[in-house]
Image (spheres, grey):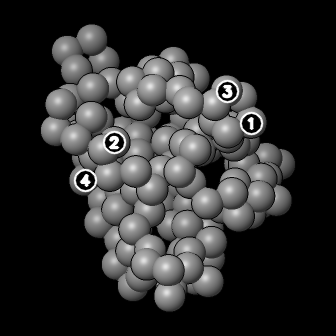
């Protein structure tokens, strides 16, 4: 049985995360495999249209999705410094396994030893 969660990995996302989630049975589309140099707005629109949680290491998505109330299925923002990147994949896998459907319509920050989940404001048509 394949997990129901669907993800869109931004070009900034470490591809090891994409491979690991795919190995776990998740539907993960990587922007880098589709088209180079998509704008942030195009990535957000695709995630929303396809009902995928966006995985990124680009802090700009915090402003675009959370602060600006842009439509989106959810965002996982990865903030791992170079010296701790060896634990990044396991941290994201654990987050996905433990939080599951709670990742939809949420803005999540994942750092070494720290996870913060905030609900996204809903637009009036949801």
For disc 1, the marked residue is 33
Q: How far apart are marks 1 and 2 (CA)?
A: 20 Å
Q: In this view, does 52 lie above or below 21?
A: above
Of callouts 1 and 2, the N-terminal one: 1
> Against 7, is 81 above or below?
below
Which residue, as the protein is rendered here, is positioned at the far left?
A: 67
Residue 33 position by quadrant: top right
Q: Are marks 1 and 4 in contact (CB under 8 Å)?
A: no
Residue tagged 2: 61
Instruction: Identify the residue at horizontal 53%, vertical 27% (top origin).
Output: 38
Instruction: Estimate how packed mark 2 is, as few (under 14), some (14 to 19) or many (20 or more) residues with alpha carbons within 10 Å.
Output: many
Q: Farthest top residue?
A: 125
Provide the secondary structure element on which disc 3 rests.
loop
Circle number at residue 35 = 3
Q: Distance between the residues labelled 2 and 3?
A: 18 Å
| Marks 1 and 4, how far apart at CA | 29 Å
| Residue 51: x %, y % from top left | 53, 28
């Amino acid at each position: 049985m394949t997990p129901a969660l669907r993800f869109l990995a931004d070009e900034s996302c470490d591809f090891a995360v994409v491979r690991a989630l795919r190995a776990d049975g998740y539907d993960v589309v990587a922007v880098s495999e589709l088209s180079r140099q998509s704008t942030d707005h195009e990535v957000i629109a695709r995630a929303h249209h396809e009902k995928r949680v966006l995985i990124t290491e680009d802090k700009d998505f915090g402003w675009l999705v959370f602060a600006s109330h842009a439509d989106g299925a959810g965002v996982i923002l990865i903030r791992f410094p170079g010296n701790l990147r060896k634990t990044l994949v396991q941290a994201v896998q654990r987050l996905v396994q433990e939080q599951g459907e709670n990742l939809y319509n949420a803005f999540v920050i994942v750092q070494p030893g720290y996870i913060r989940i905030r609900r996204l404001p809903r637009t009036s048509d949801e």
